[in-house]
Amino acid sequence: MKIQTIRILDKHIGIILCFILTLFRRCFAFFSFNRKSPIAKTQRILFVKLIEQGASVIAANTFLKALKQYGSDNVFIFVLKENRPILDILNLISKENIIELENKNFFSTAYRLIKILSKIRFLKIDTVIDMEFFSRASAIICYLSGAKKRIGYHRFNSEYSYRGDLFTHRIQYNPYIHMAYAYNLLLETSIFESLTQPLPKIEYLHSKNSIPKFEATTEDKNFISKKIQNLNSTPYKYLIILNPNASDLIPNRKWPSQNFEILIRNIINEIPETLIILTGLHSDIPKINELMKPYKSNNIISLAGELSLKELLTLYSMSNILITNDSGPGHFASLTDIHNIVLFGPETPILFAPISTNTHIIYANLACSPCVNVFNHRFSPCQDNLCMKKLHPDIIYKQIQEILLQIDRC
């Protein structure tokens, strides 16, 4: 199923299911004479993080804390199959503890989900943490997991999306803190036994969030070098990567193609010792070929659709600068030492900036931005993303010059 289809199903069918399960939960509590069983100490924990591989990078510090707290044998994660590769790259949670759901069509996905829920119950997982915002699907999965302790965001008196009352530990969503800290707070709530509302009632500390560094092997680097040499034999001093892809999840994040064209022309004309590499998915190849068409120069090549995630990270580790919109590549790049220029528009860097000292944020900060958030289920009415169009190529080019000057000084 496509992402948009999943979101529509979550919005319409999800409401009904959340309501029914909430009624069931309350009826069960009533006929149990409202006896509250003691909240067991967390021993085995499951993170539910279905979508967005970039968010898994932001959550890496939370995974590390959980592994330290509960042990590698007792930490699990549930993810859609297409979003698993970054977990294998991070190599934090044991491969056998990564539970993946293959997402094909509605009926096959539902069948596989039932089998997975049965597996989760068999594993005797006592605590589940919903790392999605206000997704109804993830709330339903947490409830049906059978875990005694279920931690997730609850809307309370706010106008967030309704998803019933399926959590034992109901968290107040805070839209003013970076998601890396928000994920940490979800984990820290797992120690609570007194269920005051809302949670967590603890001091919020701006402690440093660290994420693991990706180390490319010599073999991987040689492989990428050969790929580049096959497409370009001209010596170069700098290697700059452009990612024109914006993903289907939030298409308004896309930077206009004409801006990429201007930026490419400026780099080729003003910094001729640079090799530009365009990256993206296989489906991006036609658009990328259009971007390359005006240039007969040896200074630009495309590796779109040719690299696995591991190979892409290897390329980042060998390069100087990445220019990308706010999407997965920006977060993947934070696992390496590449200078990462990230263009923000319909979302805000306050919450989603990549965790890296080499990240450079470009943001127009319009009054209408961010327009995708937990209030609207990340659907935006915007048909004219001026927040991205106003990020003029000259601004990005100036940032590139500053970074290259800094590199030359080192």
Image (cartoon, grey):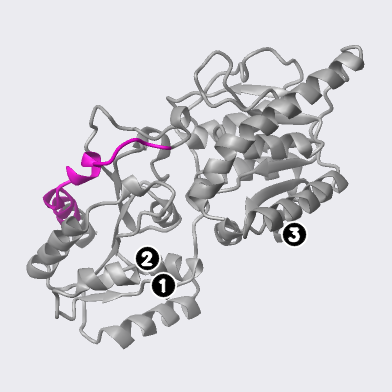
Q: Quadrant of residue 294?
A: bottom left
- At label 2, the amino acid type is Gly
Q: Earlier in the sequence, mark 3 or mark 1?
A: 3
Mark 2 touches mark 3? (CB < 8 Å): no
Q: Nearer the viewer, mark 3 or mark 1?
A: 1
Quarter of the rendering occupied by the N terminus: bottom right
Q: Who's the residue at 79% across and 41% down the image?
A: 44
Percent x, y for residue 49?
Answer: 61, 45
Q: Is residue 379 left or right of residue 108?
A: left
The answer to whether residue 99 of the structure is visible from this angle is: no
Instruction: Write down the residue under mark 1.
Output: 305
**Magenta residues (range):** 379-401
Q: Which residue is mark 2?
A: 280
| Residue 333 seen in render | yes
| Crowding at mark 1 (Cα within 10 Å: few <14, some 14-19, many 20+) | few
Say whether disc 1 or disc 2 marks the residue closer to the N-terminus.
Answer: 2
Report, in whole angstroms, how far the alpha carbon at label 1 lies from the one at label 2. Answer: 6 Å
Three-letter amino acid code of the residue under disc 1: Gly
Q: Residue at x 35, y 37 (%)?
A: 349
**Residue 101 among magenta residues:** no
Considering depth in this image, is 106 or 114 the residue closer to the camera? Answer: 106
Q: Secondary structure at mark 2?
A: loop
| Residue 222 screen position, x and y as percent | 43, 81
C-alpha span from label 2 to label 3: 30 Å
Element under disc 3: helix
Residue 397 horizontal side relative to residue 222, left or right: left
- Above or below — where is 307 with respect to 398? below
- Residue at the extreme left of the image, as rendered: 269
The residue tagged 3 is 96
> Which is in the foreground here, disc 2 or disc 3?
2
